[in-house]
Structures are given as structure tokens and as C-alpha cells.
Amino acid sequence: MDETTSTTDSPQVIALPPVVYLAGLAAGAALHWFMPLALGSGKFGMPLGVALIAISIVLVATAVRTFVKAGTNIDVRKPATRVVGNGPFRFTRNPIYLSMTLLVAGIAVWADALWIIITLAPVLLVMHYAVILREEVYLERKFGADYLAYKSKVRRWI
């Protein structure tokens, strides 16, 4: 596949999802460092945070494994080869993004850092408008009725 094909047969997202989440996490951590604002997670913060992080890891590992088995690309800059509707994709159209959200939330709870939760809100807005909606338009255009049928059965998040 040539370079032109790989860039035109993709959702043309504004930014790579891990970069969006990492930027939000970094901003929240920096704000927490300079102006600490407690979430109030108290003695439950560490176990709850670890649980959210563990769920995140299991979810992303399962989603990646499902994509690999299906033979489609995980990288949003590369073409999708098929609609994947099994594994965690039976319950959410975006298990990898849900996983990243749970990871950031888990870190926030564990660190008792409200700023990280606050900065997660703009991250989710960027993800919605600059990534997810573009992916959905791309998948509808590429897979038509197959994607629309999947989309009608499975929620975007949970």
C-alpha cells in the first residue's frame, strides 16, 4: 500500500487518541502539582484507583487482541479492514477509548487529584468531536450498511 492510500483511507482524526489522553493527564497532574485540589477519595482512593486501572488494562488488552484476531488495524492513521463486533466491541463501540478514560480516572482517584478529573472533561470533548465522530463518518462511508447495523446495536461508550 502506498503512502497516499494509507492517509486517504483513514478517519483523518485531528490527533492520536493516546496523545489526547496523555495531554489531559499531564495538564491535570501539573495543575495538581501547583494547586492541589483533592478529589476526596480518602482511604478508598488507592484500592478503587487500582481497580479502575486493572479494568482498563484488561479492557484494552482484550480489545487489541480482538482487533489483531480480526486482522484490522488498531492505528487510526491506517485503513480499517472490517467492522469488528465481537469481544468487548459487543458492548461498546470504543473499548480502547473507554479503557483510556478508565485509566485516567483510576490515576485521578489513586492520586486523589480532582484536577485530573476536571481535565478529563475537555479530553472527552476532543475525543468526541475530533476523533470518534470522524471515525464514525469514515466507517459509515467505508462499510455502509454493515457499520450502520453494528452502530444501531452497540452503544458508543457503554
Image (tube, rainbow, N blue to C red):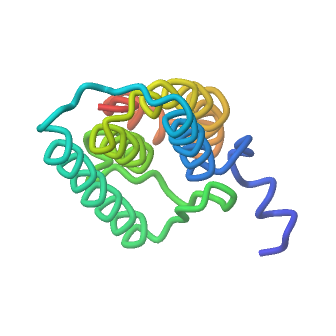
Q: Position of residue 103 (x, y in %)?
A: 36, 48
The quadrant in which residue 66 appears is bottom left
Apparent side of residue 64 relative to residue 121 in the rendered image (left or right): left
The single residue placed furthest to the right in the displayed view is 4
Q: Does residue 28 sit above or below 50 in this rendering? A: above
Q: Position of residue 13 (x, y in %)?
A: 70, 43
Q: Nearer the viewer, residue 46 or 98?
A: 46
Q: Residue at x 57, y 25 (%)?
A: 122
Q: Position of residue 34 (x, y in %)?
A: 56, 35
Q: Residue at x 44, y 44 (%)?
A: 97
Apparent side of residue 143 relative to residue 148 in the rendered image (left or right): right
Q: Position of residue 93 (x, y in %)?
A: 39, 40
Q: Residue at x 30, y 59 (%)?
A: 57
Apparent side of residue 19 relative to residue 88 in the rendered image (left or right): right
Q: Nearer the viewer, residue 69 or 62?
A: 62
Q: Quadrant of the C terminus?
A: top left
